[in-house]
Image (cartoon, rainbow, N blue to C red):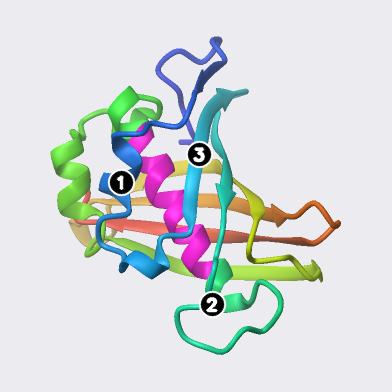
């Protein structure tokens, strides 16, 4: 079972949700809220988001002068959390059709796990202002040992105005899926 949209033939776009974004970022400390905006779209049975991000100051290390692996992961998490929340809110993925936003808030931190994370740094990216994109390639419902589980394959990429580039793939596990 792959990714399914409730209305596969319709390409839809959703501009940044100014009410949803602060709720998604609520678990993050103020200086770690890197995602500034995200536009979610559906095309060819995929859900994706195009994002604007900024890291004024690293949350854990002196300035490295470029986006580093830890910040890539934090930025990915924020893009993913927002995209899933928006997909739940708008009913964009069949596998989340039974979820409400209340379900999402309950599962956001304890039940959405990164099973595998890979990345390639092609050219240094200016962390002060960069763009990102996340794409859900597939979402499958599984029941290993009878426990409900959603597994999602995603891809991400980041870039800046000076030609900086980073990309990779992430496998997600949504445990205790309703």
Estimate the spatial distance between the alpha carbons at disc 2 and disc 1, rounded to whole Å. Answer: 22 Å
Mark 1 crowd level (few <14, some 14–19, many ≥20, 10 Å Cα):
some
List the single residue furthest toward the front.
Answer: 56
Of helix, strand and loop, which one carries label 3? strand
Residue 90: x and y, percent? 33, 23
Q: Nearer the viewer, residue 101 or 124?
A: 124
Residue 158: x and y, percent? 68, 55
Q: Are marks 1 and 3 in contact (CB under 8 Å)?
A: no
Q: Are marks 3 and 2 in contact (CB under 8 Å)?
A: no
The residue sitting at 25% across, 46% down in the picture is 23
Q: Nearer the viewer, residue 173 or 87?
A: 87
Q: Is residue 15 visible in this depiction of the protein?
A: yes
Of helix, strand and loop, which one carries label 2? helix
Nearer the viewer's eye, disc 2 or disc 1? Answer: 1
> Is residue 41 positioned above or below 75 on the image?
above
Residue tagged by mark 3? 38
Residue tagged by mark 1? 22
- Residue 46, by quadrant, is top right
Residue 12: x and y, percent? 52, 16
The disc placed on residue 85 is none
Estimate the spatial distance between the alpha carbons at disc 1 and disc 3, rounded to whole Å. Answer: 12 Å
- Residue 103, by quadrant, is top left
Of helix, strand and loop, which one carries label 1? helix
Q: Nearer the viewer, residue 177 or 121?
A: 121
The residue sitting at 62% across, 70% down in the picture is 118
- Quick one: quadrant of the C terminus? top left
Residue 143: x and y, percent? 27, 52
Q: Residue 77 colored magenta?
A: yes
> Is residue 175 positioned above or below 116 on the image?
above
> Is residue 123 positioned above or below 19 on the image?
below
């Amino acid at each position: 079972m792959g990714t399914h949209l409730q209305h596969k033939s319709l390409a839809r776009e959703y501009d940044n949700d100014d009410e949803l974004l602060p709720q998604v970022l609520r678990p993050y400390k103020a200086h770690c809220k890197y995602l500034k905006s995200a536009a979610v779209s559906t095309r060819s049975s995929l859900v994706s988001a195009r994002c604007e991000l900024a890291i004024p100051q690293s949350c854990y290390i002196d300035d490295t002068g470029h986006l580093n692996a830890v910040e890539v992961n934090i930025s990915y998490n924020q893009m993913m959390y927002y995209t899933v929340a928006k997909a739940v809110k708008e009913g964009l993925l069949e596998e989340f059709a039974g979820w409400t936003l209340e379900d999402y808030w309950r599962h956001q931190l304890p039940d959405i796990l990164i099973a595998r994370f890979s990345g390639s740094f092609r050219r240094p990216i200016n962390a002060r202002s960069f763009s990102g994109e996340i794409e859900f390639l597939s979402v499958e419902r599984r029941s290993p040992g009878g426990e409900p589980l959603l597994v999602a394959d995603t891809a991400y990429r980041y870039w800046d105005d000076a030609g900086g580039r980073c990309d990779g793939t992430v496998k997600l596990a949504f445990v205790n899926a309703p």
